[in-house]
Amino acid sequence: MNAELPTAVDNAEETLRDPALYLNRELSQLDFNFRVLAQAQDASVPLLERLRFLCISCTNLDEFFEIRAATVRHALDFGLPPSADGLSPSTVLNRIHDRAAELVEAQYHCWNKILRPALGEAGVRVFGRDSWSARQKRWLRAYFRDEIMPVLSPLGLDPSHPFPKILNKSLNIVVVLEGKDAFGRAGHLAIVRAPRSLPRIIHLPQRVSGGEHDFVLLSSVLSVFVDELFPGMQVKGSYQFRVTRNSELVVDEDEVENLALALRDELIGRGYRPAVRLEIAQDCPKPIVRTLLQNFALPENAVYFIDGPVNLNRVIQVYDLVQRPELKYPVFTPRTLRDSDAIFETADKGDILLHHPFDSFAPVLELIKQAASDPNVLAIKQTLYRTGKDSAIVEALVQAARNGKDVTVVVELRARFDEDANLGVADKLQEAGVQVVYGVVGYKTHAKMLLIVRREGRKLRRYVHLGTGNYHSGTARAYTDLGLITADADIATDVHLLFQQLSGLAPSTKLKRLMQSPFTLHPGIIKKIEREAKLARAGKPARIIVKINALNEPRVIRALYAASQAGVRIDLIVRGACALRPQVPGISDNIRVRSIVGRFLEHSRIYWFGNDGAPELYCASADWLERNLLHRVETCFPILDPELARRVFREALQNYLDDNLNAWELQADGHYRKVVPEDGQAPYSAQAALLADV
């Protein structure tokens, strides 16, 4: 915690701007991965699921460096000012290194001392190079010669062979050599790059190893047999390393005529952008480490020493290769919608609420499929941010266009790490005659909305789907999200206007039901927070409950602080980064922040305001981040049906406030404390309770 925190009890603007009241977004995001790793350390979680959580924490850390740490380094290079927390970029980078080093140490301790031994006892063995039997080594040597060696291109480093380009997150071996090669060149250092075509996990045949689920890491095989790549020379040491690069694509949209072409050009070079992190074997000699740091133009605080495979996240393949149901979460079948074969008639009778993954995503797909084949449907409009490979939704949209429907799709090309896939989606849709729109210059289209125009008798009726998550059937099985299918005329009119805005044909107009970024959502949130504060000052009950993935927007945080000072009871369920500091005397006494980490990734965004006994409940695509509220196209929609609103409150808000097994509470000092059942209190998991109702 900062040395001194303000304790003012008034709403002085300068007090609420004090940097001590704000946690750093990057460090808070980094801490989220400790909570993910805790799932890998939890003996009550099925063993292969624990392995999956370990790999998720590693993959998350990769992305953290590619985006968040890279952003801080960019701020340092360009002399950008500190954010609301007051920490300079150089200070943040130093703290990132220290905290990330703790996380890395914990990850490899979990792998080496806990999970790998436990997996071995369960009959899933991942052999290290020191534990190979003579028979295994013979087989692996033959495998190396037949399957690996032919695709390797080792490179000796000398004046005519400078340091090669190293692809982002690729596996590499730096080799120390002694002796002379065929041309009489003295050996010193060589680099062996592992092509992406090689499997990172090698499944040993049962006849060789004796076990059905026995594996070896490619990095181990390369390290042991690397000497065969340098005949006549002596290998004095081999050390695996991996470099992580800045993966944030930068396209000056004001200067390009074709965003798709510009992104394609950027994607070509993404793998070789400036480095932000070096991972290397912990026994690598310091001179070699310095050579690598110098080559990648990295400072000392960018290196991480690894006690194991540098690409530990690749062990996730074991989870997929081992079919042992008793070592995984029980399979469940989501609820299905009655009369889904007549979804328009069902929606005509009343709003449909879907709570994924407990409710199947099939009704959303069915809605689009029926629209594609229904002769009464005239037009379909949809946003796509992430869709997944071989998306059935994309196929349905293609079919709709071929069936003569007017189909317009807003494809967000700048969806991080999905840019290449979305370019392919856009091409496929355009080839089928779909009108593809790339959104608005300077604003990512993150809204999740679908509009269908259908002729019913003499009138046109509009049907809408709005959601908190992407149109992605895969993540709908792994993420918690909410979706609404409605024929409400006001909501449909609002969505129609939003699509007109995205295609460049409408000004900013006042919507009847929806709030939207970047126009009305931010001021609308603040206005509703201030309304609760006014109620509290008048002596009336005042309450706010919010469930989001991240929070850092300073004006929203100041409004929450002011509401807390006024006496509003505020519960924030924030999965990841949270810049608000709760429980500060006189400032945020009435604010509680908790994070839920369990089987499913918490992804739904819900805002609930007490409103003097007439509560308002909204679902949204937007987190309370500066980027979402001010620099993206987002939607926030009300749940108007009272029974459905009560269901959302019960399942997605109160349910999570009751959780005492998978919840972590943020303390005033910025640390999270695991919630445990109090004396006499029954253990309760929100996600398990929802699964029990499926």
Image (spheres, grey):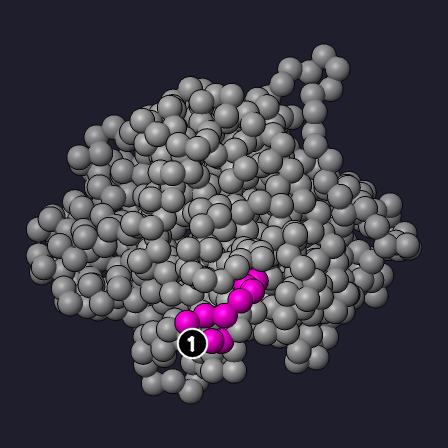
Along the line of sight, which residue is nearer the eye, 275 or 251?
A: 275
Relative placement, left or right, of 587 versus 291 is right
Element marked by disc 1: loop
Residue 126 in the image, given as x and y percentages of width and height:
47, 34
For the point 38% across and 28% down, the residue is: 209
Viewer can see residue 161: yes
Residue 504 in the image, given as x and y percentages of width and height:
34, 75
Q: Is residue 182 magenta?
A: yes
Q: Is residue 428 magenta?
A: no
For the point 64% across and 15% down, the residue is: 682
Along the line of sight, which residue is nearer the eye, 679 or 608?
A: 679
Along the line of sight, which residue is nearer the eye, 6 or 85?
A: 85
Residue 518 in the image, given as x and y percentages of width and height:
51, 67
Disc 1 residue type (three-letter): Phe
Magenta segment main secondary structure: loop
Q: Quadrant of residue 130?
A: top right
For the point 77% across and 65% down, the residue is: 91
Viewer can see residue 70: no
Per the rendered image, the range of residues in magenta is: 175-185
Q: Is residue 261 above or below residue 309?
A: below
Q: Quadrant of residue 295?
A: bottom right
What residue sits right under mark 1 in the picture? 183
- Judged from this view, the residue extending furthest toward the top is 680
Q: Residues within 10 Å of mark 1 (few under 14, many from 20)?
A: few
Could you tell me which quadrant the C terminus lies in? top left
Q: How many marks?
A: 1
Q: Is residue 694 above or below residue 356?
A: above
For the point 47% across and 82% down, the residue is: 160
Q: Is residue 434 above or below residue 2?
A: below
Residue 395 in the image, given as x and y percentages of width and height:
19, 52
